[in-house]
Amino acid sequence: MTELERRARDMRVDIVRMIAEAGSGHPGGSLSCVDILCALYFGGAMEHDPQNPRWEGRDRFILAKGHAAPALYAALAHAGYFPREELMTLRKLGSRLQGHPDSNQLPGVEVSTGSLGQGLSIAAGAAAGLALDGKPQTVFALLGDGECQEGQVWEAAMFAAHRGLDNLVAIVDRNHLQIDGDTADVCDPGDVGAKFAAFGWSVREVDGHDIPALVEALRAAKAERAGRPCVLVAHTVKGKGVSFMEGQAGWHGKAPNAEQLAAALADLGAAEKKGE
């Protein structure tokens, strides 16, 4: 197991533990995007500084699929933005770790998200602002594939291509499931990459659980700067890493009980610690 793979495994352990402790949350889509966040925050694909979260030279990351906040919180804690022990306060009264990310509460969160469809618009606006100011930083946005059923996503896609925002990189967590079932059955987004290409975007397809491939694809997308935005369609498995959650829409927004937590930790190669 490589260092980045171990990091991703430990992030998954933290995710299932914090959601079980909270008694609510979204494990499926959090687990599916862990390797993407690991590549961004620890693979050198994104410039950021945990000691100076508002550093002007940072790249920006926007979690459009805000319900996957546990994955972002795990990445931020592992990176050193706040103590890892704080993860166990998820969704508790007075916690900075709310059910969806709150930029007023937590360092490292660029913008409050959770209303699906809005994240890419925010990211496009941020990218446009940086471009107008002649700044070289890149804006990354992580979307869900169910989220791509929202019309606002495609308005933002049209705007970003029209403005030639080649400092914008979107990543679609293509796990094929949403709260109501398979995306193809709910409102089929079809070939997501082809749709973005039709809107004038550069498109890359990648295995969303192959961390070296993700790092390479993210770095290439960031460096491309070909006068158009870029999207990575990351093919993932909802609930990745926990056998009974994998590919199950029912684990979109349900916390594991004590027995399920123990089974999940066993899958991930981690033993439950009493008192945690």
Image: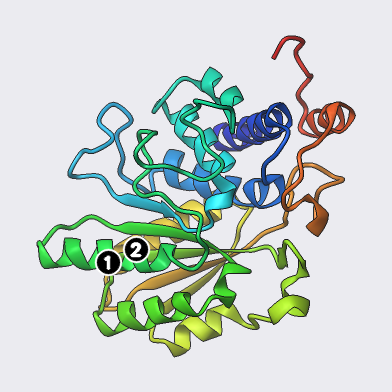
Q: Name the residue nearer the viewer: 27 or 200.
A: 27
Kindly identify which residue carries mark 2.
122
Q: Residue furthest front?
A: 93
What SS does tag 1 mark? helix
* Image coords of residue 101 (percent x, y): 47, 44
* Image coords of residue 7 (percent x, y): 57, 32
> What's the residue at 23%, 38% (across, down)?
54
Decide if residue 14 is on the left or right side of residue 153.
right
Q: Is residue 7 above or below residue 124?
A: above
Decide if residue 149 is on the left or right side of residue 45.
right
Quadrant in the rendering for residue 106: top left
> What's the residue at 55%, 18% (across, down)?
85
How packed mark 1 is, by other alpha carbons closer than 10 Å (few <14, some 14-19, many 20 or more), is: some
Q: Is residue 170 visible?
A: yes
Q: Quadrant of the N terminus?
A: top right
Q: Is residue 248 visible?
A: no
Quadrant in the rendering for residue 5: top right
Residues tagged 2 and 1 counted as in contact (Cβ below 8 A): yes
Q: Is residue 81 above or below residue 134?
A: above
The residues bearing labels 2 and 1 have C-alpha atoms spaced at a distance of: 5 Å
Q: Name the residue nearer the viewer: 258 or 236.
A: 258
Disc 2 residue type? Ile
Number of numbered discs present? 2
> What's the residue at 18%, 63% (across, down)?
129
Q: Name the residue nearer the viewer: 229 or 145.
A: 145
> What's the residue at 72%, 73% (across, down)?
183
Q: Residue furthest bottom?
A: 198
Kindly identify which residue carries mark 1.
125
What SS does tag 2 mark? helix
Decide if residue 69 is on the left or right side of residue 60.
right
